[in-house]
């Protein structure tokens, strides 16, 4: 476990680093062309009158931001308030040090603080390290629902 890492809410000045980690995730997932956003859009969307997302960052004293958990508020008609975790990313050099777990724990605590009853996210079926971490943390894996999306 890397004890030098601090977890905090992202600030507008962090968006270049946040976006760089999103691009790193897209490379890892073999879909770099799927990223249409840029750091300036992240900055604008994070400071809007009603921000489109919240983001927690894992920060190393020398290396800067080495991980992110980007999430947003949503609503479940069955559970009520929920947090949807869109991306959980740790720089490759810092993986397997417990940083991803700390970020997920921070998202769960954030959900509790905001009154949410549920945290949802997705994981690619081939991302075994992430699946193992989620399983160890007690996550439930849905075998009934199929993800859907539509670009507009």
Image (cartoon, rainbow, N blue to C red):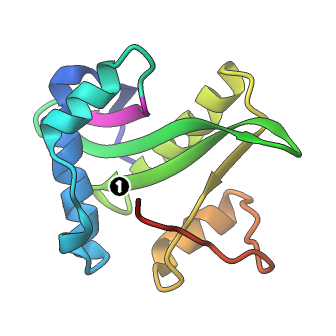
> Residue 55 occupies which quadrant of the picture?
top left
| Residue 14 visible, this orientation | yes
Q: Look at the image and tell me in which quarter the C terminus lies.
A: bottom left
Q: Is residue 122 left or right of residue 21?
A: right
Q: Nearer the viewer, residue 152 or 91?
A: 152
| Residue at 53 percent of width and 68 percent of height | 149
Q: Position of residue 5 (x, y in %)?
A: 32, 35
Q: How many marks?
A: 1
Name the residue that disc number 1 marks. Answer: 89
Numbered range of the magenta stretch: 52-60
At x 23% / y 61%, what residue is drawn?
35
Magenta stretch holds residue 95:
no
Q: Is residue 55 magenta?
A: yes
Quarter where residue 139 is shown = bottom right
Where residue 91 appears, as percent x and y from the top left, is: 24, 56
Q: Residue at x 34, y 35 (%)?
A: 57
Relative side of 130 to 1, left or right: right
Q: Position of residue 12 (x, y in %)?
A: 22, 22
The reply to whether residue 60 is visible in this rendering is no
């Amino acid at each position: 476990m890397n004890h030098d890492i601090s977890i905090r809410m992202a600030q507008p000045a962090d968006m270049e680093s946040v976006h760089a980690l999103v691009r790193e995730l897209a490379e890892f997932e073999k879909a770099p062309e799927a990223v249409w956003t840029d750091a300036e859009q992240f900055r604008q969307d994070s400071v809007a009158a009603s921000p489109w997302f919240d983001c927690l960052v894992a920060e190393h004293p020398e290396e800067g931001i080495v991980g992110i958990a980007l999430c947003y508020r949503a609503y479940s008609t069955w559970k009520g308030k929920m947090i949807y975790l869109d991306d959980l990313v740790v720089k490759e050099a810092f993986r397997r040090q417990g940083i991803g777990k700390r970020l997920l724990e921070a998202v769960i605590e954030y959900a509790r603080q905001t009154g949410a009853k549920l945290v949802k996210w997705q994981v690619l079926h081939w991302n075994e390290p992430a699946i193992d971490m989620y399983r160890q943390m007690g996550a439930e894996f849905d075998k009934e629902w199929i993800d859907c999306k539509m670009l507009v």
